[in-house]
Amino acid sequence: MIEALLKIIDRLIEMKKGRIKSRKQVFDMVLKPTFDDLLAAHGDYIKMFQQLMVFEGDQRPSVLAKRIAKAKKQLQKNRLEFEPIRENIRVVARQLAKRNLPDEETEFVNAVLQYFPSGEPLLPHSSATT
């Protein structure tokens, strides 16, 4: 994890110093690796949810509640595995958001930031969202 973070920091330093001049270099050195990491994190989310068989079998409320509680614990545990990658992606996206990038790159960065929400509800707070 530390090695990956150091690579990202090196990429950002290179950008800051102006050594990455062309859009292709920015794409190859920063955007593509970030996208690849995003694909890996997304694949991990899909894998985690596919492994849970919460609604299969006995549907009695007491049995279902136990399976949901077990699934919640399992998700929390599994989520830790890709947390370093998700955090690296967030760091890069936040740093890129501060730069004056072309429109296409800005759209990509915004999409990445939206993929990892802040935890704040998007809808006005109501009893339905609590």
Image (cartoon, rainbow, N blue to C red):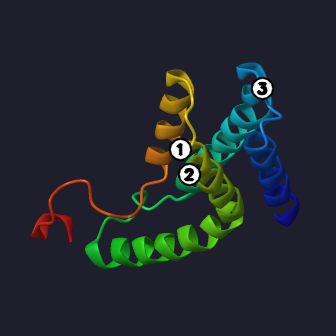
Q: Is residue 109 above or below residue 129?
A: above
Question: How many residues crowd mark 1 within 10 Å: few (<14), some (14–19), many (20+)?
Answer: some
- Left or right, residue 124 beside residue 57: left
Image point 64% across, 43% down: which residue?
A: 38
Amino acid tagged 2: Arg
As measured in the structure, the alpha-carbon distance from the residue carrying label 1 to the one carrying label 2 is: 5 Å
Amino acid tagged 3: Lys
As measured in the structure, the alpha-carbon distance from the residue carrying label 3 to the one carrying label 2 is: 20 Å
**Comes first in the chain, label 3 or label 2:** 3
Residue 20's x, y, as percent?
Answer: 80, 31
Q: Which residue is mark 3?
A: 21
- What quarter of the picture does the C terminus occupy? bottom left
Residue 119's x, y, as percent?
Answer: 38, 64
Q: Which residue is mark 1?
A: 97
Q: Are marks 1 and 2 in contact (CB under 8 Å)?
A: yes
Disc 3 on helix, strand or loop? loop
Q: Quadrant of residue 21?
A: top right
Near-viewer residue (71 or 7): 7
Q: Which residue is mark 2?
A: 94
Image point 43% across, 57% down: which residue?
A: 56
